[in-house]
Amino acid sequence: MHFSRKLQELSWTRRAAPGSRHCALLALGGLELLPDLSGALYVPDYRSLLVADLHFEKGSSFLRRGLYIPPFDTRSTLAVLEAAIDRLRPERLIALGDSFHDGSAGDRIDAVDLARIRNLSDCLEVIWISGNHDQKLPAGLGGRTAAEVSLGPLTLRHLPEPVLSGTFEIAGHYHPIASIVRRGRRLTSRSFVADRSRLIMPAFGAYTGGLDVRAPEISSLFSEQAFTAWMIGRSAIYSFSSAVLK
């Protein structure tokens, strides 16, 4: 599935104002990308909002196995997603796989939550990329499904694949987190991880865990294990070279 470029009327080349929910823009494949505090990524030239690893109904899957945690993660995740859509006003939402925690999530999801998900596709174009957790999506979601999506030079998929010279990828799956030490304190947060050819999205879901970006599963995806982690703080997003991460 391939989409052609649609230039924004607004300019996104400036840095965000202090206190905003954005940071300086990322660049990949000649496109500017706007990371959001929610963990979403906005692609202005395509008016597309990207999210990865929503893992709807993870809480109810634990409950089914006798592990009680409040099973309201779907509702919480949807609230954050809806707020990001209201704020950024995309024309298209692309979910990069593992939107649902397992194949039976559709049997457990509350009807109100399912209706809210369906309402997304009534308001904008929605594309569900399949992941390893949700190869079978619940019925009645709305939108379309795809194995991968192309936004101009960018290929969007769930699992990262080898990136050939001159190609560019945005993927999910690994739920990256990064840590730094400041004033003797170790600070850890969800992170976008990128080099000049690949970007790995943070997990968006409320109950998703994380994998340290220095773990070989993530670091080996980048040439010479050199990359930048864009750490999501409370009020801003900060970039750090892989060399300074702890």
Image (cartoon, rainbow, N blue to C red):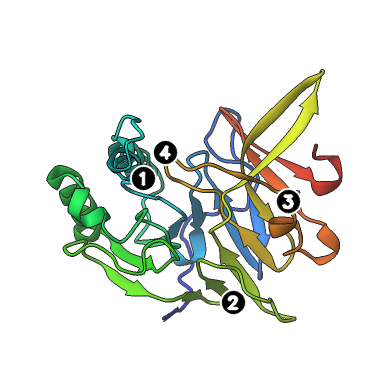
Would you identify the image quadrant in which residue 130 lies? Answer: bottom left
SS under mark 3:
loop
Q: Residue 215 carries which label?
A: 3
At label 3, counting other C-alpha atoms closer than 10 Å, the crowd grade (few under 14, some 14-19, many 20 or more) is few
- Measured Cα–Cα span from mark 2 to mark 1: 33 Å
Of mark 2 and mark 4, the one earlier in the sequence is: 2
Q: Where is residue 1 in the image (x, y as percent from the top left)?
A: 41, 81
Q: In this view, does 234 lie to the left or right of 107?
A: right
Disc 4 marks a residue whose amino acid type is Ala
Disc 3 marks a residue whose amino acid type is Ala
Q: Which mark is residue 206?
A: 4
Residue for point 19% across, 59% down: 122
Q: Is residue 108 left or right of residue 4?
A: left
Q: Where is residue 225 in the image (x, y as percent from the top left)?
A: 82, 59
Q: Mark 1 points at which residue?
A: 58
- Measured Cα–Cα span from mark 2 to mark 3: 28 Å
SS under mark 1:
helix
Residue for point 85% across, 40% down: 244
Of mark 1 and mark 4, the one earlier in the sequence is: 1
At label 1, counting other C-alpha atoms closer than 10 Å, the crowd grade (few under 14, some 14-19, many 20 or more) is many
Q: Are the residues tagged 2 and 1 within 8 Å (C-beta)?
A: no
- The label nearer to you, 2 versus 4, is 4
- Give the residue furthest to the left: 111
- The label nearer to you, 2 versus 1, is 1
Q: Where is residue 71 in the image (x, y as percent from the top left)?
A: 29, 35
Q: Mark 2 points at which residue?
A: 153
- Measured Cα–Cα span from mark 1 to mark 4: 9 Å
Disc 1 marks a residue whose amino acid type is Lys
Residue for point 51% across, 48% down: 203
